[in-house]
Amino acid sequence: MKRLLIIAAVLLGTAVLHAQEIRSIDIDVYLDEEGNACIVQNWDVTVVRGTEWYIPIGNLNGSTVRGLTVEENGEQFIDEGRSWDTERTLSQKAGRCGIVDKGKDGVELCWGQGSMGDHKWKASFVVLGLVQSLQDYDAFNFMFVNPGLVAPPQHASICFRRLSGDAFSADSTRFWFFGCEGESVLREDGTIFFETDRPMPGNGKLIAMMRFEKGVFTPENVKDFKFEKMQKKAFKGSTYSTKSTPKYDFWDIVEMIIGGGFLLMIAALVLGLIYAFFQDQFLKLTGHQWKKSVFGSTKPNGWAREAPFKGDIPIAVHLLTDGSRLLLSTHHPERRIGAYFIKWISEGLVTPIKADGNRYNLKFPSELPDFADTCETNLFRRAMEAAGSNLLLEKDELKNWAEVHYKAMTNWPDSVARTGKSKFSAIVGDKTEEAANLLRFKNFLSEFTLSKEREVPEVTLWGQYLVFAQLFGIADKVSSGLAKLYPTQFAEYAGQYGLDSMTMRDVIHTCSYSTSSAYRSAFGKAAESNSSSSGSSGGFGGHSSFGGGGGFSGGGFGGGSR
């Protein structure tokens, strides 16, 4: 009995340590002239049980699924057609794929897992009749990622392209996304792209609804109703609305202002802003700008020579955000982006390459690193996308990307704070003293150049110094101070990255400037979009709706290992 208990404990421990995981599902959808779709799914997963991976697709609504192909590491699986046998062993299914025909319930796409552990599969199949010909438009409402998968996806994206190479046009196309949190956009190259901006919950799904003017496609899947019927079902329970914005003339607006007491509200708001401004200035001048409940004091004094909580950036972001007493502070979310860029350089993940003047381009790796935090993974993935096919992030490329994907860029800093709050809450015991060390570490980085002590700070921590200096908004000051006070050590530190003291400072400045510029551009675009009358409800892109999506075709419930 004791031996059985030990074995059970080991198995349970193994299951906990090596949980089933879906890191990402990246999907490409190619639409031909008849509205048929070739769907390519890229799965990045960890499997710990089962013999096969399967995806149920039901409710086909006049469309059909065929032609499954699967490959891994460049090796194409053997296609068994529609005669897939689920009652086989792991080794018998390895390197093979097929379809289970469920009759009226649709199909199951299946392939052998081959082994436990990490896998990257590329699965392709065809959906004939995806686009439906309606009375007034051509359209579809289709589920591309199921709820109830064996593990909730940490990231998902989908890109729609025309097989002919023609671009989708804002004049003839509208699109909406449901079931998960993320952002959609009609890109400059004429493709429609959606990406989640946070991990999906267990009931999360990815549903896309698109509407096209007649003539874009010539679908054979004909339905005798108008698009309005499809739209009403999908919009029910969503944050989208079919209602148009009411229009008012000048006197209507005057009447509303007078009748509603808006002038008093505006006056109160102005007075409140003035009060908040002067209070913030007073707190900054006296230094008592921090919450005692978080840091144990409104002005923690002294020095700490290294970052608390093992240098965890999200926890630091959370403390600086929730621990501030300032009323008007924006907490400088752009600094969080720059801090990660400097972290990647200090860890050797990204390589600085000399460009024109004192600027540096950043060379990214071909594979996405394995980070502990999803927020860091998402930022790295977006930076790689901005870098383009050559994986070299050049001048203004991050800014240009951010202007197109402004929702993703402006929402990302909040995801870091949320991650930090969750991690901080999970720490057991009194955390006040260690939290205060974050501000003492800030004091150290701000003041070490003024100290009469000339003890050389530990060089192995200089990467951490520069990362947190960026987070505190003093990266240029700290890098200049280290170079001035400890020229030999700073030169040796810079030499690890093929740089000298001056060029290392240029790299720090480039990271700080380019990330701040990209965030400000995205923030400006977001403000412009929010003030525009053509919001996401109009089908021009924007944030998705977690609710809604009813009346969809395709998809189903569940999938993954079995």
Image (cartoon, rainbow, N blue to C red):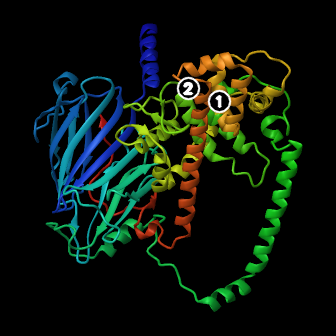
Q: Is residue 198 visible?
A: yes
| Mark drawn on residue 466 | 1
- Which residue is at the front of the view, 365 or 275? 365
Does the CB distance between marks 1 and 2 fall below 8 Å? yes
Which quadrant is the C terminus positioned in?
Answer: top left
- Which residue is at the front of the view, 10 or 145? 145
Residue 65 image offset from top left, x and y in percent = 17, 51
Q: Which class describes the residues within 10 Å of circle 1: few (<14), some (14-19), or many (20+)?
A: many
Residue located at (49% from left, 40% from top): 379
Q: Quadrant of residue 449?
A: top right
Residue 228 image offset from top left, x and y in percent = 33, 75
Which element type, helix, strand or loop, lies under badge 2?
helix
Residue located at (73% from left, 28% from top): 481
- Which residue is at the front of the view, 170 or 221? 170
**Circle 2 sits on which residue?**
346
Q: Is residue 147 visible?
A: no
Using residue 286 as the reference point, say whether residue 168 is left or right of it: left
- The number of numbered discs placed on residues in the rendered structure image is 2
Residue kind at label 2, given as amino acid type = Ser
